[in-house]
Amino acid sequence: MNDAVLFDEIATADGRRIGVALLNAEKSLNALNLEMIRLLDARLSIWDRDDGIVAVLLRGSGDKAFCAGGDVRAMREAILADDSYPNAFASDFFAREYTLDHRIHCYRKPLLVWGNGIVMGGGLGLMAGASHRVATASTRIAMPEITIGLYPDVGGSWFLQRMPARSGLFLGLTGAPLNARDALLANLADHILPQAGWPLLLDLLQQAAWQAAPAANHELLTALLGELEAGNGDALPDGNLARNLPAIHALLNKGSLAAFDYALRHGSFGDPWLAAAAQSYHAGCPASAALIWETFHRARHLSLAEVFRLELVLSVNFCAAPDFREGVRALLVDKDRQPRWAHPTLASVDDGYVAQHFASPWRPQDHPLATL
């Protein structure tokens, strides 16, 4: 039996059903592998066509994480084993992952993600597009791809644009973490519920007066979550993002990435969260920083489907470059935290190197995501 993702259907009081999907890889903090992506996408497609399913719930096993990202170690191994371009495993993995993310963004029925604990990388790709995104007191959200020589993908080029004062660009460049209060401000969560509130939520959903029309059920679920949120007695950590928005705004309005880079490397930050973000940027991949900056500006007016098509091109090109393999080695394989970046400084990353990451290996009609 395949148990990478566990599926269940819960009967409601009025004879309808709620689909529940559980990412079942607690030891790896529910990091996504290709099997999990395939299973989840297939079941969401089935539930979307099933008129008896009124809503879908998605959560991770255990208390530590909803999903800590993708299985980048397996990706690195596949790249090292096959130096063809574009790498077949990378192309398939990212295409399937982005298809799943796009499906979630466009899902007709209410789709609730229980974003408890760690929500990073590919996990945020699942959560960001859901119609109802729940955070708890333990939620810790981040897009830390710069630390492994990658960039915020899984739709990051879309949802980072939709944060106040260009804070999304700051989060992409620094990998700075967000808590539950931050997530509301950053438009990455819609409700903060009690951390132990899952059983009560299930009970209330079973008793709810669901309708045939998905639009009515979206409203019903929003109202129900609002009531639960009003009764949340958990102590929540103070938000970091709101306090630092003026500083973030100033840093990102210095006119260039080079000026931002200089300010973070030579500035003095009294706020611990901001100081940690600056340190994370210092340790990150300079080429990733250049690509994150350029992608943020190129993707500004793209549609959601265009964003995922662009990200697939970027992702296979990142996999063909050396920094991703080196970043994963340093952080997750050898764990020496001493990456030897191909371009050790921002000044060494030239415009041509940046531009080649945007060159597609496919003709438009042959792009794996052409039909999104």
Image (cartoon, rainbow, N blue to C red):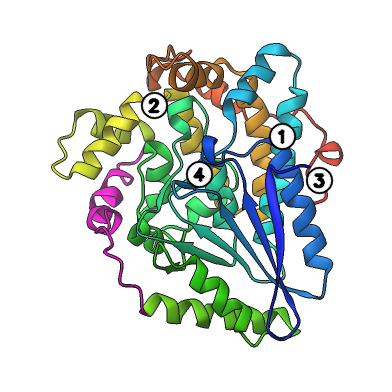
Q: CA distance from mark 2 to mark 4?
A: 17 Å
Q: Which residue is mark 2?
A: 284
Disc sitting over residue 33 in the figure: none
What residue appears at the point 71 percent right and 56 percent down from the top-left corner? 7
Kind of residue at badge 4 = Phe
- Magenta part of the chain: 231-256
Q: Which residue is mark 3?
A: 370
What residue appears at the point 27 percent right and 35 percent down from the top-left corner? 278
Q: Position of residue 118 (x, y in %)?
A: 44, 46
Give the mark, 2 or 3, whose residue is nearer the N terminus.
Answer: 2
Q: Position of residue 241 (x, y in %)?
A: 30, 54
Q: Secondary structure at mark 4?
A: helix
317 with respect to 42 (left or right): left
63 with respect to 357 (left or right): left
**Which of the pair 105/246 is nearer the observer?**
105
**Which of the pair 23/341 is nearer the observer?**
23
Give the mark, 2 or 1, whose residue is nearer the N terminus.
Answer: 1
Q: Which residue is mark 1?
A: 93
Disc sitting over residue 296 in the figure: 4
Give the mark, 1 or 3, whose residue is nearer the N terminus.
Answer: 1
Please state which of the two labelled residues, at mark 4 or mark 1, is closer to the viewer. Answer: 1
Give the mark, 2 or 4, whose residue is nearer the N terminus.
Answer: 2
Q: CA distance from mark 2 to mark 3?
A: 32 Å
